[in-house]
Image (spheres, grey):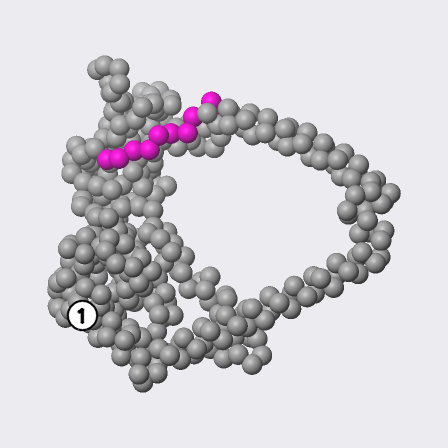
Amino acid sequence: MSRAARLGAFILVSLGILAAGVFIIGSKQYLFSSTYQLKAQFDNVVGLDAGGDVRVGGVHSGTVHNIVLPHKPGEKVTVVMDLGKSTHEIIKRDSVASIETEGLLGNQYLAISFGSAAAANVGDGDTIASQPPLEMSDLLNKMSGILDSSQQAIHNATRATANLDSISAKIDKGEGTAGALVNDKQLYSNLEQTTNAMRDTMVHAEAGVTDFQENMEAMKHNFFVRGFFKKRGYEDSSELAKNEIERLPQGTPVKEFTYPAKQLFDKQDSAKMKNQKSLNDGGEFLANNQFGFAVVVASAGMEGDTQKDLVLTEARAMVVREYLVENFGFDDSQLKTLGMGKQTGASDAGWGTVQILIYPAGTESPPNKQTQAGVASKAAADQPGQASTAPTPKPQ
């Protein structure tokens, strides 16, 4: 091969390598693919640079186009990103951008969380929410504070150990009440007898309370007084907490439905429903949309007895839930209840309101009220000679 041919081959191979490099770099920077832009604002970008990586769900999905400083103090730094079109279906208006670090001291990159299915799509040039980045200086300051607290705890533990040694020595010598108990067998025997007598008294008291509760439950199903409870739309208050949670969860609902109690129930102190079809819009949304879980929240006005209003709102939430479960197809384990009792903003001429609050997937559900009550009920049922009955509520 001549010298000119070898030179030409070398030039062609070099140009091929250069073209491949340009193509690889260009594809990582999305120079040869369709993209759209999003913005996020931060107080501090902690070393993030233009051209940095943008990841969606941990996958490289774009690059930082540029970083714009604010025009005056008090404003935020704006980060403009170029994202591949493939992310348009998973990034929503409720997605959140955050600045993360690869490892402890690695490079910064921009991470974007998935949006919820019910949220609207983002458009080209939209600004999404952001959360402040964790700065190493703040982390080091916190670690320093933890170390200082640990040293103080160790010092306190050392002092407590010394005090315990002193107390043990006094007990061994018979000084003080504890020393007398340890060294005087007669005093210890008298104290043990007194403790046993108190324990027997508590057992009898608990048995009396249990008998009283059983008598009250029997009265609720007695022919003469059963109508009093049935008139209010429920028969067994123990079932009201079956699907009830302790409190509302943290976070904002993606959808809310509010109904005046006067529109749904026949009387101000009743849980009997008269206009169930008013709930159909909420039921249709539950049946036709994906969601994490929903809560039926019932509130009463400020008039009347506080305890009765609490039981009444629990019963109203329960009968609304049962209507939705029976008439609309969705996972009933996702629908909870919460009786709020008296609420200042739920007057409606003293009747109160009923709300259906729907939360997105990923929202942490508070524990059920029956979780704690169930432990006590099971312990009572395990005692010999005691039985537990729980008739099913019959909402109207």
Q: In which quarter of the image is residue 379?
A: bottom right
Residue matched to label 1: 273
Q: Residue 209: say if magenta.
A: no
Q: Residue at x 50, y 66 (%)?
A: 376
- Quadrant location, the N terminus: top left
Residue 150 visible in the picture: yes
Q: Residue at x 21, y 52 (%)?
A: 346
Residue density around tag 1, few if under 14, some if 14–19, many if 20 or more, within 10 Å = many
Residue 349 is situated, as x and y percent measured from the top left of the image, at 15, 55
The magenta stretch spans which residues?
128-137
- Please state which of residues 127 and 390 is positioned toward the viewer in this rendering: 390
User: 270 above or below 25?
Assistant: below
Residue 63 position in % (x across, y down)? 29, 31
SS majority, magenta: loop
Q: Can you tell which quarter of the image residue 244 is in?
A: bottom left
Q: In which quarter of the image is residue 203?
A: bottom right
Q: Where is residue 196 in the image (x, y as percent from the top left)?
A: 70, 65
Q: Which residue is drawn at 23% across and 68% down?
A: 271
Three-letter code, disc 1: Met
- Give how far across and how far down residue 387 sits, in percent: 49, 79
Q: Tell me: 134 left or right of 327.
A: right
Q: 32 or 106: nearer the eye?
A: 106
Q: Which of 133 and 111 is in front in this view?
A: 133
Q: From what the image shows, is residue 287 above or below residue 85?
A: below
